Amino acid sequence: MKLDKDQKKNLYDSMLELIRVTSTQIPEDVQKEVLKALKREKKNTTAKYAMEIIDKNIELAKSKSQPLCQDTGTVLVYVDHPVGFNQGEFTKIFEKAVVDATKKGYLRQNSVDTLTGKNDSMNLGPGHPSIHFHEHKKKSLEVKMMLKGGGCENVGAQYSLPNVALEAGRDLDGVRKVILDAVVKAQGKGCGPGVLGVTIGGDRGSGYIASKEQLLRTLDDKNDIPALKKLEKDIVETSNRLGIGPMGFGGKTTLLGCKISALNRLPASYFVSISYMCWAFRRQGVTLTGKQKISKWLY
Amino acid sequence: MKKLNYPFDEKQIRALKVGDMVMISGKLFTGRDAVHKYLHEGGKSPVNFKNQIIYHCGPVVLEKGGKYEVMAAGPTTSIREEPYQWEVMRDHGIVGVIGKGGMGPKTLEGCRKYGCVYFHAIGGAAQVLAEKIKSVDDVYLKEKFGSPEAIWELTVEDFPVVVTMDSHGGSLHSVVEGESTKALASELKKKKSTAKKK
């Protein structure tokens, strides 16, 4: 499947627009939880003050069409494509959209050569943007995107069970203990109230990848697996009783959500991989028509 | 709500306490990972930091017709500067640090000893904070470190922050950390005792 000239142009326009919207607007499901948190915090506290500024920031970013947060993060892209799709061609067009989004200020010059420390100022280089392709049976192309900043990425954690120090064994109670430990350790640093994407099992690599994919679920999405559904709810409720609060100022809202999946593991391994997303949860997605124009926004 | 106006001095700084909500007006200098490492290794500072405030921030800046425009400018996580910050207080005489997430005991001791405070800005609030920037007055070390890591000299008006570490040994971060760690221990105990009852 080769794209013609018009399709290429449309795909480029669609991707640039996807980057703009992702960087400047918060998805509806997240904003709903932010508003709930704002109401929940007590008057005349620094927690309430923080939530008020967050709320105002969401409105301002949207109306000015400028980045919600200056750390426009790792550009994470999840492409579901039909059989026979040309991944190389997509990558080339998407990278051009990234460069132009950077020139327009939707993205910060955010990609640094780890060895030389040089910032090429165009956001391209080994590992960036991070594009994940999956084949699906549909005929249309679906592109989901997240911008994940360094502050929240740095507080992600991976535990190997059993964990002696935390008395965490190889069961869901042990999983609960290490997740809550990560929540306490993330305080202040990850721009709370945040959202957790968690994967139990897998290897060290697949666990982290899958934990990020959990962040593609909307916050009101319920887990199909009863035990995980229960654990997700419990993690949010328990975390919100710890008094960490927005920005770690103390307060009632520490987490806006928690999403958990499970992968098979080796008999010898039992990993819990946790990805933390900040309140400035930049996630969007589109379905494209055959002409590569946006037909539907996914969040 | 308190006001802190430029020029800053130690007396104003010593009057601030943990929990104070403050509006800062005047000059700020951004400086983050690369700048702190550079100063620590004996690099020559291109600006005189005496009585100035350092802002842990890597802004999105566009150059339009030879002028700089700040598109987004929230705080970055401060704890990465924990090894260096006290030294910058001692050697360069800064009186304030703006960032997010708070800092550790070395910085807290530096604040007490050299007369400095830690202001917490709201992480992720890049637009609310960029709106308070009235002008970009200069930029230093941009070629060397790249735009996000450069020192941007900014003039701000009513820049909203909360004092979370003061010059008298007070730290909101150590309080919340202590209390939440205790709260977690009691949550875990709760679960244990209900499990036993069954």
Image (cartoon, grey):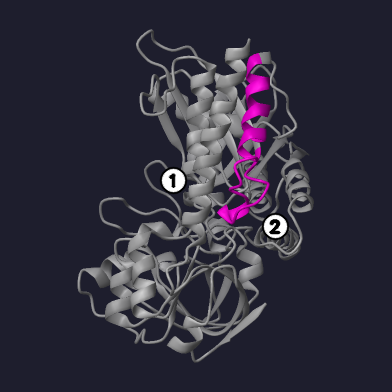
Q: Is residue A252 magenta?
A: yes
Say whether mark 2 and mark 1 are on the same chain.
Answer: yes
Tell me the kind of residue under disc 1: Asn
Is residue B172 placed above or below A36 in the rendered structure? below
Residue pushed farthest left?
B42
Q: Is residue A155 left or right of residue A298?
A: left
Which residue is at a point 68% across and 14% down the rendered structure image? A226
Q: Image quadrant for the N terminus of chain A?
A: top right
Instruction: Give coordinates of residue A28: x percent, y percent.
Output: 77, 44
Q: Which residue is mark 1?
A: A154
Residue pushed farthest bottom?
B7
Q: Is residue A90 visible?
A: no
| Among numbered discs 1 and 2, the one appearing first in the sequence | 2
Residue B20, located in which quarter of the rendered image? Answer: bottom right
Which residue is at a point 48% across and 82% down the rendered structure image? B13
Q: Which residue is mark 2?
A: A51
Instruction: Give coordinates of residue A119: x percent, y percent.
Output: 37, 59
The subunit letter for the residue under badge 2 reads A
Near mark 2 (Cα within 10 A), the count class, few <14, some 14-19 or many ≥20, is many
Disc 1/disc 2 C-alpha distance (Å):
22 Å
- Give the structural element (helix, strand or loop) at label 1: helix
